[in-house]
Amino acid sequence: MRVMHVMGGGDVGGAKTQIMNTVTGLAKRNEVMLISFRAGPFADEARERGINVRVIERHNPFRAARAMRDLVDQFRPDIIHCHGGRANLMGAMVRRTRRVPVLTTVHSDYKLDYLGNPLKQHTFGAANAVALRFLDFYQPVADRMARTLIERGFDPERIVKIYNGMEFRRPEGDFDRAQYLKENYGAEIAEGDVLCGIAGRLTAVKDIATTVRAFAAALQGAPQLRLFIAGEGEDEEMLKKLCAQLHVTDRVTFCGWVSPIEPFFRAMDINLLSSVSETFPYSILEGICAGCATICSDVGGMPELIDTGENGYIFPVGDDKKLSEYMARLANDAELRQTFAQALYEKASRNFSKDKMCERQEANYRHLLARFHRPKNERESIVICGAYGRGNAGDDAILEAIVQEMRALDPERTICVMSRRPKETRLTYRTGAVYTFNIFSVLRRFRRAALYINGGGTLMQDVTSTRSIWYYCYTLRAAKKRGCKVMMYGCGIGPINRAGNRKMAAKTIQCSVDRITLRDENSRQELARMGVTRPDIRVSADPTIILDAAPYEVVSLAMEQSGIDPNGRYIGFGLRNWKGLDAALPAIAAAADYAYEKHGLTPVFVPIEFPSDLTPAERVGALLHCPWYAVRTRQPIEVTIGILARMKTVVGIRLHSLMFSAGQGVPVVGMSYDIKVDSFLKYIGSSTCTQLREVRADELCGLIDKCLSGALDEEVRRNAKLLREREHENVRGAAILLGIQEEKEEQAE
């Protein structure tokens, strides 16, 4: 692969380290040319490392762009990779006349790059913001920056993530930190001092004032603390005055520009970061490598690196009180500092090494090149339609599962979702999205789509609305008419009560659908009664069965934030408002009290549709005589699944509370309000089901006893495995329609 990297040449700090690590790592297996728009130390160092470096020192952007075009013609790169504002501007100008994909790594928030300097912000910053819109692909160095780009209107399918990486090697040899600090910074330290270091430019975006205020407060409980600030910038005088005002000048040392940085961090016990905005700062990685414990603000990719309370601490941006608390805690606990430092080193060296970064970078290049060179007239996209963007965790989980499966099937295909909240869908699932009822946009998408997926869920029903079944039938016909393969994916059918609706749905499915996968046997029988025979019909399982729970620590933290002890024993409830609930409330409350008194299980109400499911939870809670909890904030799907997986048993009205639990091997008690609940429980062979309109306390208590007796454990585990195996029928059907798998291969299986 031939890769041209383009940079301004004056890059410092983390951006400089990341670029140097990238070009030197890639050069081992690829042809790399580095263009710098400034001569100096960076270009010289790269040249010394064997990189093909070309310097273009021209202030006129049009002449600089012409020189860069000449180098593009000579080198003939497969991809141009830009870093920073000036490089982005040059890349955008060259892109207009050369058919080479242009990628930019977004090292920082471009709107905050010149914070505190209005002149540069409205000149260089504005030019960079415009240039970014004319590039092909974007590579943020943290997921949070990816979210920021999407919120600002960048196409999520032109964004790929990368994480900074470095060579993790513990420093070797003896090191006298007292001597180092005295000789270099004139600082005298005493035995027992705990040293905190922060390295960065002294500018507004680094918010070092928060560190100084927190340090001053932490001294009250940990007088052995010392603070060392490494860096230069326009905020230096302000910070020195702040130290004087807080009477901590004698405990704070301003070190100026520090190079090399390794001995500085070797001298520190705690590495700090208090920035307002970052992506994936190298100063944190460098401190980890040197063996520091870490406290940082909640910015960029830090939550992906640091698990608060497990291997470090993360505090809210600007929260000097929380930072002060963490500083004092670590200052007074040497063992905790050592534990955090070792755990974070192990995680970082495993997941964020230089080699791992270069592997990801090459994979990103291959992915983007495949996207860029797809024939313009090729039908390649997948359009997904369902009840999405309405805040229902079950529907959201279906979409997440389908997107996950389609990307695994062919990661180069683009995906567009028909959603009630397209902006939210783009941000959450990183797909294209159009408003469900913007029919003109939908039809345009159909003309470029290879596959239209209708589902999952129960879209073909007229209990909630006749309009919805007419609309879904229209989209099936419209997609087929415009040349799409059409699939109904892991769905349920019915009830369809009106004769006209049954006739219309049957005719539409018969004529316009190529393949149907159903999540239960009752749906197959319903199609047979409707006279549907032509499409290839298979029984599979709900797509959400494939979703895994979030990591244990993440689920534990979410439970703690809801006031729930992660180590407790619980019975879960997944309730919803529905006709018949009022009469059932006393029985549900009596069963919850019974589970607490006999089995020691505290009730936990887990909403699937937020916040509407909290209402029945509160109503049952008001009748309880035992303690109870509710998850009162919207949680990611994986966290909701993880919370349900912690339950000893789950009593559910909501279908997906039962599906999520069963998929995790948790025994369930269903209170059926709809045929789809009966169908699912019948499909998995469950005998623990009652009708919502007929629910009685003694029956519910008996079913809870049965679930907790252990007699069903083997059956529950077997059903969870069976559901995952059957769900694969959904993906197989899509693969056949897309031509990825042959029908004969499927039959052979």
Image: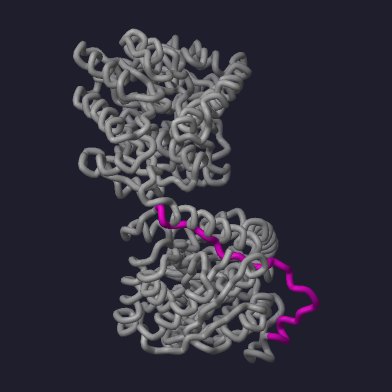
x and y percentages locating residue 519 in the rendered image:
44, 21
In-image side of 77 versus 149 (left or right): right
x and y percentages locating residue 543 in the rendered image:
46, 30
386 in relation to 169, above or below: above
Which quarter of the figure has residue 313? Answer: bottom right
Instruction: Please report the residue visible at 50 percent of the width from the left and 10 percent of the height from the top.
Output: 687
x and y percentages locating residue 705 in the rendered image:
54, 15
Magenta residues, as a range? Answer: 157-180
The answer, for residue 641, to whether it is visible in the render is: yes
Instruction: Please report the residue visible at 37 percent of the width from the left and 84 percent of the height from the top.
Output: 61
- Image quadrant in which the N terminus is located: bottom right
The answer, for residue 604, to whether it is visible in the render is: no
- Image quadrant in which the C terminus is located: top right
Numbered-mark total: 0
543 in relation to 162, above or below: above
Q: Is residue 87 within the magenta segment? A: no
457 in relation to 678, above or below: below
In-image side of 532 versus 371 (left or right): left
Which quarter of the figure has residue 473? Answer: top left
Q: Is residue 177 within the magenta segment? A: yes
Q: Which is more toward the observer, 509 or 329? A: 509
